[in-house]
Image: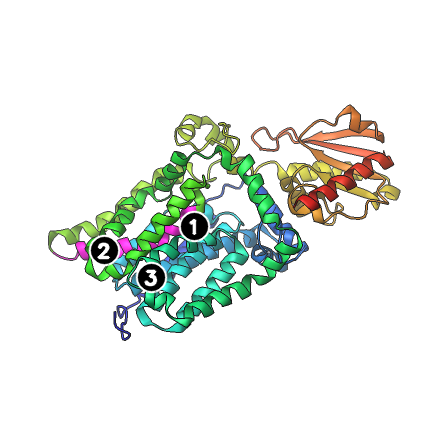
Amino acid sequence: MSALYAPARRFYGGWLLAFFFLKLLGQYLLIHPTYQLHRDEYLHLDQANHLAWGYISLPPLTSWVAWLVQALGNGEFWVHFFPALFGALTLALVWALVHELWGGLYAKLLAATAVLLSALLRLNLLFQPNSFDILAWTAAYYCLIRYLNTRRAGWMLALGIVLGLGMLNKYNVLFWAAGMLPALLLSEHRNRVFGHRATYLALGLALLIFLPNLLWQIQHSFPVVWHMNELQKTQLVHVERAGFLKEQLLFFLNSLFVLVAAFVGLWRYAPLKPYRFVGWSVLFTLALFTYLRAKGYYAVGLYPVLLAIGAVYLEHVLRAGPWRYVRPVLVAVIAALFIPMLLIAFPNRPPQAIQQKGERYRAMGLLRWEDGRDHALPQDFADMLGWREMATKAEQAYQLLPDSLRQHTLVLCDNYGQTGALNYYALHRLPPAVSVNADYVYWFPDLHQIKAIILVSNDALSAEDARHFARVQQTGTVAEPLAREYGARIYLLTGPDAAILQQLKQEIMDGQQLK
């Protein structure tokens, strides 16, 4: 490729803006009002109250976005806005990738439609690191392709920034690098990449950006290792390799032909030949994920670049003769095949309606939770129910306490979802809730002055634990039957003895040492 290489002239920015805002708006229309925030979202939002260079569950970038959400009022509109924005930016990058590969308007429209009407709509619903992760993967491909096309070192440095920020968001971006490294070594670009100092400057820049989190990991004895081991034992052990591969087909099922066209085009269409390393990197990363029994959505960041490549090839194949009449048909096929996905893959219907269509969901594997068993609702949907009720009942328990005890009350929960939900819905009306689960193990108040505990627990309080309190009162339970937290109990415990407080201190110390 010549250093004077220039992509197709027209960018069609007006069309892109239309898709961009359609993507933003669409995210708000896909959640039925019955649903609340997801359990993971509450933890990420709470991290804004404890800004640090790292957390047990993930690196710090999501907490920075959570801080911005909080500064904007902490309403659900802004909680949903940022993942939607990252999704819209991913679509814009796919448009730019098509442009960089000499694709015209049709290729851009086809690729944008495939991105818009896909599993990305589902991932971009939730305030989690996944939306920025996919954006980072797509941006990494774009920067690398731009560098190879233009030979400008600035694009390699931009790649370093993208990878550094990607690591500050989610360590998953390491798998992008793990697949790309052998792909580039086997490609015609190896000397241009590994023989140029810009590559090593970019690597140093990525490490510099990531360094604060790395130092945090060292200071806290690498909690990411503990977290991955725990994830392997409790969740990934239930992931079947065949199931992982099946999920890859489902993510972009309605545009699968575009993904197939990408691989065909990389090997048959001469203008795409310089980008064969992209295909190899995808295959290497998929093989690694399959071997490690990764969750299916870990690999979603691989596909936006393939949609861009496939759209460029299909535009070429359908450029003349009667084949040109197939062009609008393919766009219509993507839209038509997305309708069944729209009906079952999104929380856009009330839980009772989903329960009535349970067999359809079960056949698609959507009712299988991390425990390997089928339930009444998809796990993510069940994780969006019951939280307000729980927070209200915890507040009611707190109101039963005399004023003399309220300032000496600890709000203790079993898991991070319960804890974060209480801190979101009962902010300033309850003392900050804590848990020995996840990041909350570092955020406990001083226990010396504790005279009462509001306990939110999935299990009944044992007689052994109850004897450590002067008074035990169960004040409520979560009554929403389809919530994952259904049956969680709210206890008001007063007069804790020294032994139970010492036991809790030991659990906190053990948790911090392990993590």
Q: Position of residue 91 (x, y in %)?
A: 38, 57
Task: Indicate yes or no whether the magenta region holds residue 311.
Answer: yes
**Residue for point 38% across, 71% down:** 196
**Is residue 287 placed above or below 397 in the rendered structure?**
below
Q: State how far apart marks 3 and 1 are (Cα).
A: 23 Å
Tell whether 496 sits left or right of 365.
right
Number of residues whose C-alpha sits closer than 10 Å to that of mark 2, classed few (under 14), some (14–19) or many (20 or more): many
Q: Which color mode does the image show?
A: rainbow
Q: State how far apart marks 2 and 3 are (Cα).
A: 13 Å
**Label 1 secondary element:** helix
Of tags 3 and 1, the one toward the viewer is 3
Number of residues whose C-alpha sits closer than 10 Å to that of mark 1, classed few (under 14), some (14–19) or many (20 or more): some
Task: Indicate yes or no whether the magenta region holds residue 91.
Answer: no
Q: State how far apart marks 1 and 2 are (Cα).
A: 28 Å
Q: Which residue is mark 1?
A: 26
Q: Which mark is residue 281?
A: none
Name the amino acid, label 3. Answer: Leu
Q: Which residue is mark 2?
A: 313
**Residue for point 49% across, 47% down:** 125
Task: Write the start and end of the magenta stretch as one range.
Answer: 299-320
**Is residue 74 placed above or below 152 in the rendered structure?**
above
Number of residues whose C-alpha sits closer than 10 Å to that of mark 3, classed few (under 14), some (14–19) or many (20 or more): many
Q: Earlier in the sequence, mark 1 or mark 2?
A: 1
Image quarter of the N terminus: bottom left
Q: Position of residue 360 (x, y in %)?
A: 40, 29
Tell whether 161 sits left or right of 113.
right
**Label 2 secondary element:** helix
Q: Which residue is mark 3?
A: 97
**Residue for point 37% across, 42% down:** 248
Tell whether 507 sits left or right of 80.
right
Main SS of the magenta part reads helix
